Image (tube, rainbow, N blue to C red):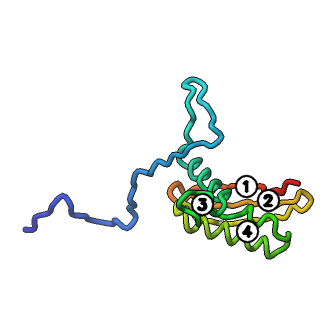
Amino acid sequence: MAILSDKSIFGEYSSSRIVSRKTQWSDLDLALTLHPIRKDIIPLKDDRAIKNAVKNLLLTNFHERPFQPSIGANLRGLLFEPADGITRIALKDNILRVLIQYEPRIKVLDIDVKNTSDENGYQIIVNFLIKEYDRQDTVEIVLRRLR
């Protein structure tokens, strides 16, 4: 007679899946929006926090963060290069590099860089998948030269 413990598994278990608690992410809203009652800054939570972190990484230039000179996409540095295909490829490469290296919570799906030469700039749309929430999101950035 075999003694069965309560840890024994019988039957079909290949269709079972692991359910775990999702990590909560929070970030400071740089717009500094105040709560109407508490008069305190409202933090960003979960997918909005991740979207804000992606936007902050893209808008950061090299040497802007103390003791971390390589963090950033350096998009403004490429803004004054000739408006051609090579610059658009360099913008895409910088965006992809910084997101792969410094944002492991997402998977980049598509990067679209449009030249808006009549406005002296670029419109950048980054589509990505937030891995933990299995949700697709988009960040849009408009880079313009001021004259």
Mark closest to the chain's N terminus, 2 or 4: 4
Crowd rating for badge 2 (residues with CA inside 10 Å; few <14, some 14–19, many 20+): some
The numbered disc on residue 86 is none
Mark closest to the chain's N terminus, 2 or 1: 2
Where does residue 129 sit, x and y in percent of width and height?
60, 60
User: Which residue shows up at 63% across the image and 61% down it?
Assistant: 128
User: Which residue shows up at 62% across the image and 62% down it?
Assistant: 63
Disc 2 from disc 1: Cα separation: 7 Å
Where does residue 71 sit, x and y in percent of width and height?
59, 63
Residue picked out by circle 4:
91
Disc 3 from disc 2: Cα separation: 20 Å
Residue picked out by circle 3:
129
Closer to us: 65 or 82: 65
Q: Is label 3 or label 4 in front?
A: 4
Amino acid at circle 1: Glu
Crowd rating for badge 1 (residues with CA inside 10 Å; few <14, some 14–19, many 20+): few
Disc 1 from disc 4: Cα separation: 14 Å
Amino acid at circle 3: Leu
Residue picked out by circle 1:
140
Quick check: marks 2 and 1 in contact, CB under 8 Å? yes
Q: Looking at this view, name the residue that lies furthest to the right.
A: 118
Q: Looking at this view, name the residue that lies furthest to the top.
A: 37
Q: Looking at this view, name the residue that lies furthest to the left.
A: 1
Q: Is label 2 or label 4 in front?
A: 4
Amino acid at circle 4: Leu
Where does residue 82 sit, x and y in percent of width and height?
85, 71
